[in-house]
């Protein structure tokens, strides 16, 4: 083979590998035309608007096949009753702690409100850091997911989550948590809890999109995140969050 | 699925205050209490052996091999409670093949393999090589072949070979001490690095784990030495026993001081979590921490050992008092593991409530399995004694050395 022929073939090889490689990369990056690098999802919660109806909890359980028993939640709503004597009563509105154990009359109450909770999809997620096998990971579009075909069920992530957002699925024996309804948002649909919220207390948005309701929410409110001192950098933002909420 | 639901429904009745709804289950149960307890015994027994070797303490030479074999027996069983606890034990190999390098738990594969293959097995092999060669020459089938295989068909009894063994042993022991520190310090780090959990999240935890490991390891070797020597109808060497007991005494003092420092530091800093942690200690852990760990597991044995030192107690009574002390210390260290692992999961990360732990008797995460896991290392140790005789061969060793 002379030099000219060799260089020619080498060029063809490099060019074809580049083309095939880029095609494969494109195919991987965009299943069904979805490109994760163009999105970054976040959620806003207007605590003042939550009426504690619990529809988000029901919708989440139905949409994501979360076990129906009151010990497993991807999202839940807490009711806070702050009494005049500064005692605080907290309940999960649809859990086993849903019933008040003590009588509270209207006169005793200083203020009362609801706070929806879910996985904070932290930007600096402790669960991802501790997972020994990388079954929990952060996607390019900013959502923390669990690969249940890889999870070994060691439960270290459950211990590491400061928000109690994770549980072990009683049948699958793998870690479970809110995914922002990843199967829906990648098809341009809203998460189930946001979809059903009658008061728009939950606002879903894409940081990378030019016009998003979340952008408006972040502009118009003083916002706060849960347990900021832990430096988990949550991407669920709360407006008018009471200091008693942990 | 129903048994777990029934179990959780039962626990729900015992919850006080508010806990996040997913927090009702204590995820790391009795098996995860057993795991740091066992690795602690490994590290402690090995550190005792290393102290003997490095500082050439003559009184304790006779337990050097016993300590090494104890460390190996417990190390071989150490992964078992972890494996049994996993939701998918069949995927456990992923930790070795696909470790997430930012995970403390994923380091298990590296730390364990390093410690087993590089430190313990090599040290035992070089310690026993010469004896095993001699044994395999004298014995008949099948032990002859067992020893030939274990010693990897080595038959070098030359002076040069034995000097080489000694040199290698020295090097391994020097690598071994930091490795033992790494093994148990790392187990402590698994807990200490969880910032979400104020009961665990402390830079002192790995150090406390390490010293409690040394305490429990030395106590175990003393216990085994006393039991086996008596069983073999031989006299307990009081010089050896006193020396080990004084090591134990100093280790308990350091451990106790560190735990007190941790306690006082938390109380003094009085962070956000202090109220719920106080409630945890006063309600849920009062017996296991206040009574068993501190009073029975530390203060009482410390008192006994001080009394032994001050009052010059006669040998027979001394043996009995040592025996009582080390049993108390073992129970105390097991309680320490319990209080860290179970205690750390009994309060809500909302700092507003406490959950309960109800240990199952049967079942894979139950008491019976835990007892079997705790008993297995002793079975392994009995088998190891057959392959690596810790005493008989030493006598031969001495005889051979004197005849040479």
Image (cartoon, grey):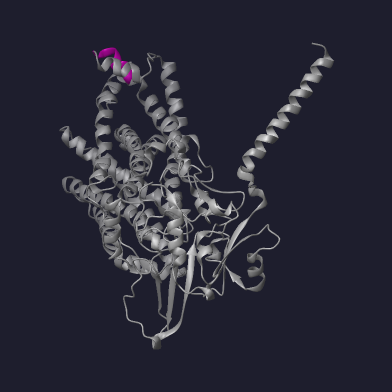
Taking B197 as reference, is B92 above or below it?
above
Taking A113 as reference, is A107 above or below it?
below
Q: Position of residue A128 (x, y in %)?
A: 52, 50
Residue A16 placement: quadrant? top right
Q: Nearer the viewer, residue A126 or B394?
A: A126
Q: Position of residue A3 (x, y in %)?
A: 83, 15
Q: Position of residue A127 (x, y in %)?
A: 50, 52
Taking A66 as reference, is B126 above or below it?
above
Quadrant assignment for the C terminus of chain B: top left
Q: Is residue A245 left or right of residue A205?
A: left
Q: Residue furthest toward the right?
A: A4
Residue range in magenta is B132-140
**Within the magenta stretch, is there residue B270?**
no
Taking the spot 58% from the left edge, 49% from the top edge, the residue there is A139
Taking A38 as reference, is A110 above or below it?
below
Q: Position of residue A77 (x, y in %)?
A: 45, 68
Q: Nearer the viewer, residue B364 or A198?
A: A198
């Amino acid at each position: 083979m002379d030099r000219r022929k060799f260089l020619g073939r080498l060029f063809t090889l490099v060019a074809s590998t580049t083309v095939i490689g880029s095609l494969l990369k494109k195919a991987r990056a965009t299943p069904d035309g979805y490109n994760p690098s163009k999105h970054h999802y976040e959620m806003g919660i207007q605590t003042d608007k939550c009426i504690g109806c619990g529809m988000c909890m029901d919708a989440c359980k139905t949409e994501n096949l979360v076990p129906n028993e009151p010990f497993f939640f991807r999202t839940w709503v807490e009711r806070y009753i702050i009494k005049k004597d500064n005692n605080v009563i907290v309940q999960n509105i649809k859990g086993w702690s849903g019933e008040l154990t003590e009588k509270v009359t209207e006169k005793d109450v200083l203020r009362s409100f609801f706070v929806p909770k879910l996985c904070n999809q932290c930007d600096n997620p402790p669960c991802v850091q501790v997972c020994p096998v990388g079954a929990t990971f952060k996607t390019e579009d900013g959502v923390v997911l669990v690969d249940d075909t890889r999870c070994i069920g060691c439960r270290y992530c459950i211990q590491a989550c400061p928000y109690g957002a994770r549980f072990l699925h009683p049948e699958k024996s793998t870690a479970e948590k809110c995914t922002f309804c990843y199967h829906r948002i990648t098809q341009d649909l809203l998460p189930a809890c946001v979809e059903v919220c009658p008061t728009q207390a939950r606002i879903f948005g894409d940081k990378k999109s030019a016009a998003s309701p979340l952008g408006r929410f972040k502009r118009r409110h003083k916002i706060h995140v849960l347990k900021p001192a832990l430096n988990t950098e949550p991407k669920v933002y709360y407006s008018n969050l009471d200091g008693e909420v942990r | 699925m129903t048994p777990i639901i029934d179990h959780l429904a039962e626990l729900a009745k015992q919850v006080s205050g508010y806990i996040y709804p997913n927090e009702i289950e204590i995820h790391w149960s009795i098996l995860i209490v057993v795991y740091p307890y066992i690795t602690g015994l490994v590290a402690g027994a090995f550190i005792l052996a290393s102290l003997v070797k490095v500082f050439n303490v003559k009184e304790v030479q006779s337990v050097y091999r016993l300590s090494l074999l104890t460390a190996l027996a417990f190390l071989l069983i150490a992964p078992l409670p972890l494996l049994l606890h996993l939701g998918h034990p069949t995927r456990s190999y992923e930790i070795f093949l696909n470790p997430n390098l930012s995970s403390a738990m994923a380091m298990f594969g590296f730390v364990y393999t390093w410690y087993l293959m590089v430190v313990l097995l090599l040290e035992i092999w070089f310690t026993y090589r010469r004896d095993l060669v001699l044994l395999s020459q004298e014995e008949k089938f099948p032990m002859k072949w067992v020893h030939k295989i274990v010693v990897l068909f080595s038959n070098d009894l030359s002076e040069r070979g034995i000097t080489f063994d000694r040199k290698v042993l020295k090097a391994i022991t020097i690598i071994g001490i930091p490795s033992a520190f790494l093994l148990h310090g790392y187990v402590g780090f698994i807990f200490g690095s969880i910032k979400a959990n104020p009961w665990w999240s402390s830079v002192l935890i790995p150090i406390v784990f390490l010293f409690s490991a040394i305490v429990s390891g030395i106590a175990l070797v003393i216990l085994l030495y006393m039991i086996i020597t008596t069983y073999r109808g031989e006299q307990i060497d009081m010089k050896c026993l006193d020396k080990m007991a004084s090591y134990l005494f100093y280790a308990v003092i350091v451990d106790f001081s560190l735990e007190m420092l941790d306690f006082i530091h938390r109380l003094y800093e009085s962070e956000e979590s202090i109220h719920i942690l106080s409630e945890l200690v006063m309600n849920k852990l009062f017996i296991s921490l206040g009574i068993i760990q501190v009073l029975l597991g530390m203060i009482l044995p410390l008192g006994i050992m001080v009394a032994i030192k001050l009052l010059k107690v006669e040998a027979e009574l001394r043996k009995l008092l040592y025996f009582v002390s080390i049993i108390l210390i073992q129970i105390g260290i097991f309680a320490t593991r319990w209080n860290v692992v179970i205690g750390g999961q009994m309060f809500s990360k909302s700092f507003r409530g406490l959950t309960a732990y109800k240990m199952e008797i049967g079942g894979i995460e139950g008491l019976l399995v835990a007892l079997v896991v705790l008993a297995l290392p002793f079975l392994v140790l009995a088998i190891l004694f057959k392959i690596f005789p810790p005493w008989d061969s030493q006598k031969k060793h001495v005889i051979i050395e004197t005849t040479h």
